[in-house]
Image: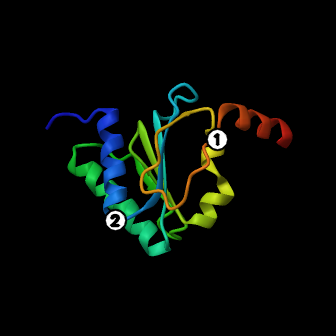
Amino acid sequence: MKKLTTAGKKKVVISALDDIQAHDIQAIDVRKLTSICDWIIVASADSARQTKSLARHVRDRLRESGSTIIGMEGEESGDWVLVDAGDVIAHVMQPAIRSYYNLEELWGDGRFDKPVNAAAPVKKVTKRRASIRRRKAA
């Protein structure tokens, strides 16, 4: 089986999330910000059960495509489940947890793809707004 590229993994993750109706799926290119991974994908689920199901579906679809899964965390509670596929990391979260941790702002200097299956208009954090927020927080 041919090894999946990073872009291919990203597509598989987004497709898997969309299959089971995750919403507000946001892909963030963080290659210029960290060496941990290339892409962070954040998505919302409406319940702990859906969060766990989405994360398992992402894991299974990545494995079917020949990708290695480094790990999964958070399945016990289902509030926030992380699927680590090396160069692509997916975060499936319930809305309150997503709002509280606000990963989009944390990675605000990254390049954002257009959101998939947005429940409401998504406020994009611009580099300028992100730096202003960081200065205010300091």
The reply to whether residue 138 is in sight is: no
Compared to 104, does 99 lie above or below?
below
The reply to whether residue 98 is in sight is: yes
Count of numbered tags? 2
Q: Position of residue 77 (x, y in %)?
A: 53, 70
Residue ranking furthest to the front: 121
Residue ranking furthest to the left: 1
Q: Residue at x 66, y 54 (%)?
A: 101
Q: Quadrant of residue 127?
A: top right
**Reading the chain from its start, which is encountered first: label 2 or label 1?**
2
Q: Quadrant of residue 133?
A: top right
- Horizontally, residue 20 falls left or right of residue 96, namely left
Q: Position of residue 24 (x, y in %)?
A: 49, 56
Q: Amino acid at mark 1?
A: Val
Q: Residue at x 46, y 39 (%)?
A: 113
Quarter of the figure that contains the C terminus: top right
Q: What is the secondary structure assignment of the residue under circle 1?
A: loop
Q: Residue at x 32, y 55 (%)?
A: 16
Q: Amino acid at mark 2?
A: Ile
Mark closer to the observer (2, 1): 1
- Read off the residue under disc 1: 125
Badge 1: residue crowd in 10 Å (few <14, some 14–19, many ≥20): some
In the image shown, does 84 or 24 lie closer to the viewer? Answer: 24
Compared to 104, does 31 lie above or below?
above
Q: Position of residue 4 (x, y in %)?
A: 25, 36
Please, which colouring scheme is shown? rainbow
Q: State how far apart marks 2 and 1 are (Cα).
A: 27 Å
Q: Position of residue 130 (x, y in %)?
A: 71, 37
- Read off the residue under disc 2: 20
Q: What is the secondary structure assignment of the residue under circle 2?
A: loop
Quarter of the figure that contains the N terminus: top left
